[in-house]
Image (cartoon, grey):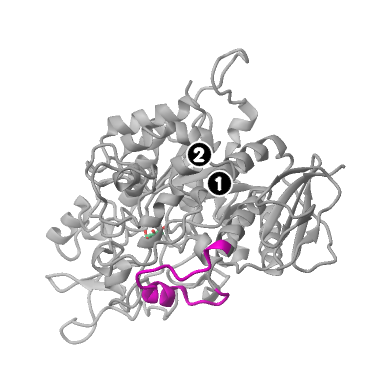
Amino acid sequence: MSLSTVPNSTSEAGPQVDVESSRAWWQQAVVYQIYPRSFADSNADGIGDLRGIVSRIDYLTKLGIDAVWLSPFYPSGWADGGYDVADYRNVDPRFGTLEDFDLLVQSLHAVGIRIMVDLVPNHSSRLHPWFVEALAAGPGSPERDRYIFRDGRGVDGSLPPNDWPSHWGPQGWTRVEDGQWYLHFFSPDQPDFNWDNAEVRQEFEHTIRFWADRGVDGFRVDVAHGLVKDMSEPYQHFTSFSPLLTPTDGSHPLFDRDDVHEIYRGWRAIFEAYDPPRMAVAEAAVPAERIPLYASSDGLNQAFNFDLLFTEWSAAEFRTAISTNLDIASSSGSPSTWVLSNHDCVRHASRYALPPGTDRNAWLLASGREPSEDRSTGQSRARAAIMLLLALPGSAYLYQGEELGLFEVANLDVATLLDPVWTRTLHTEKGRDGCRVPLPWRAATDNFGFSAGASPLHQPGWFADFAVDAQEADQSSTLALYRAAISLRKQLQGRDVLAWVDTADEDVLHFTRPGGWQSITNFGSSPVPLPVGKVLLSSGPLLDGLLPADTTAWLTSTA
Ligand code: NOJ
């Protein structure tokens, strides 16, 4: 049964999708991010692919997720793990074909799982035909106007048009043979589009329809705050990409400008023309108070809230992050989105295993051959954190491998790194490859069952202990916990609100949810009493009826 159609009979076999909830399915969804290169490989070339994902549908079903978000699988120069797209309406041959994509959509829909794809509208690849045409057509041409080309400064134009940096390097401009410069937020392989150009706007509307017509349920919008730029002269000066330093009045020349929402209003109209409507989540690095502009009823549906991803293991900090985002959610009318990990950050089991305040880049660079973190603490906290997150109102975005409790692969040989961060920062930042190592499926199989061929990002020997088959045989495994927690959340999740319960202990976070569900987390170092109620699930064993350190429990609200 396709999720695009609504069943008209409750006796129909297979997953049922209710009309009302299907319109807003994303509001309380558990979404699982798949980084295709590292998930599962079906053809032994050492690169994960779409048929590899199809071969693991059973795994996704057992996990109990509502949707998959697929990171880019489009033809690409792979200068930034696929976030450098050369053709927005096709599949990279290394990942498969459009027919494989259709098979994936059908296979997911058949088991009641929706699919979101990544849309990368801020920049293309240098290999995109439009950029190739822009280089050939020369200054002042309509082809060049699809990107942001400018003359340089100085007598011979050999200085960049201004001093804007890029994300991973001191200079946001690169010079081409005829002497002009083009703008890129990220690497020189990722030229920024000119969103004042009508063709660019039409092209993306076409792309959205193309995937929506193929049954895609939603989109994750990359760098959603960056599309509209103020290129008027004199150029404004800025030095940092941090949302904390971005003005909150939309006056930054490159990010979070108010006009960007006109684009999203147009996209929303396209989404709403489908039945059920398509949706989108914005990746927008903006100050918290600007989030509702993205997660709005006439713009994109949701915006990522990355606060928990930046929060240290502390009850007070978690409470602040949660309260702030619940307030934002109520002012935007769009439930929050909770994230502990994704393909851009050190895995949270490792983050919690490091002493507070650790410089993670320095740790990655120094970690040598053996892991140096306190894994037992990291594991307990990661398990407690996910139960806390899954008890929150709103949607939960999970990253592949966190359900296995994977730690960062910190000791990757620098000669094998793929992330452009390593080269662009002149080997001062190790980058994001440590969370992108292929998943371990079978403990005793070559390449841990990921592929019959080895991946360029080497899987360490300790992955054996984290393999899916090893965890399936163990009721106390992290995988078993994720399956149980997601399933229970589905039964318990009611209205989208939470009430804090004040506790005597400042290291304890306790809240109730409508329908008689409560969650309590002990961030401290000694066991604490549990509230009255029947324990439904806990992230680790209880200790003589007490809640141990670094543990979350869910309880009914009556004894
Ligand atoms: C955000 C993506 O998550 C990241 O992986 C990518 O490098 C940048 N956007 C540029 O597309």
Exactly how many numbered labels are in the figure? 2
Residue denoted by label 1: 477
Q: Are marks 2 and 1 in contact (CB under 8 Å)?
A: yes
Indicate whether residue 83 is drawn in magenta.
Answer: no
Q: Nearer the viewer, residue 297 or 198?
A: 297
Which residue is at 33% across, 55% downward? Answer: 459
Look at the picture and state if 352 lies above or below 439.
below
Q: Position of residue 92 (x, y in %)?
A: 25, 43
The label shown at residue 472 is: 2
Mark 1 element type: loop
Instruction: Sort mark 1 into few (<14), some (14-19) or many (20+) by Cα contacts within 10 Å.
Output: many
Within 8 Å: ligand 1 and the Cβ of disc 1? no
Compared across the picture, whether 204 is left or right of 242 comes to left
Indicate whether residue 361 is drawn in magenta.
Answer: yes
Residue 421, image quadrant: bottom left
What's the CA distance linking mark 2 and mark 1? 8 Å
Which residue is at 85% across, 66% downward? Answer: 504
Q: Nearer the viewer, residue 223 or 232?
A: 223
**Residue type at numbered disc 2:** Glu
